[in-house]
Amino acid sequence: MFDTWEELEKSIENCQKCKLCKTRQNIVFGTGNKNADIMFIGEGPGADEDRQGEPFVGRAGKLMNMAFQMLGIERKEVYIANIVKCRPPGNRNPEEDEAEACMDYLRNQVILVKPKIIVLLRKCCAKTYFRKRIWNNSYKRKINRKERNKIYTNLASSSIIKR
């Protein structure tokens, strides 16, 4: 584990831990307030994110920005990251070995941000982050989980914007 953002970001610069490195344009590390109370975790970068090197800048990012606006949240107030840091081909869900290869980076991001709330976006994020046993139990009941002063919530089965 790394003690500073600089060390963590440098450690991922030339990552070759999984096959996703072969097709990436940019590593999509994370963005936002590095001391945020709220952290959003997505599954992986899409084409726009891969081109720009920043998470949630494509269509999903536009929806996220609309949701933030409706909630009175500034995007720069939160921290946004993905489970995998390179784009899966065809925007498919990350495979288990790809997610596992990036998990230490994500865990280190969570440790450095120290968020009070972690929002896991999409079903595969919650499944990957909590492993299958815990995920199956919480998903069926659609409950939040509290652990070490953090609240994890799953938006996988609900719409971000309800009209």
Image (cartoon, rainbow, N blue to C red):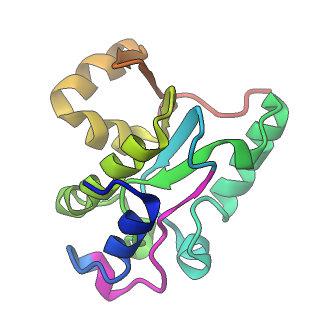
Work out whether 94 lies above or below 156. Answer: below
Q: Residue at x 32, y 83 (%)?
A: 14
Magenta highlight on residue 55: no
- Image location of residue 36, percent across then percent down: 60, 39
Image-based side of 99 in relation to 154, left or right: left
Q: Quadrant of the C terminus?
A: top right
Q: Quadrant of the N terminus?
A: bottom left
User: How many numbered circles does the render carry?
Assistant: 0
Can you name the residue that lies furthest to the front here?
A: 3
Q: Nearer the viewer, residue 163 or 73?
A: 73
Work out whether 71 lies above or below 59. Answer: above
Image-based side of 162 in relation to 142, left or right: right
Q: Nearer the viewer, residue 86 or 47?
A: 86
Q: Residue at x 56, y 28 (%)?
A: 158
- Image location of residue 38, percent across then percent down: 58, 34
* Snapshot quadrant of residue 9: bottom left
Q: Nearer the viewer, residue 10 or 15?
A: 10
Q: Residue at x 40, y 72 (%)?
A: 86
Work out whether 111 lies above or below 82. Answer: above
- Image location of residue 60, percent across then percent down: 64, 54
Image-based side of 105 in relation to 47, left or right: left
Q: Residue at x 38, y 79 (%)?
A: 13
Q: Which residues are magenta?
A: 20-32
- Image location of residue 128, percent across then percent down: 27, 43
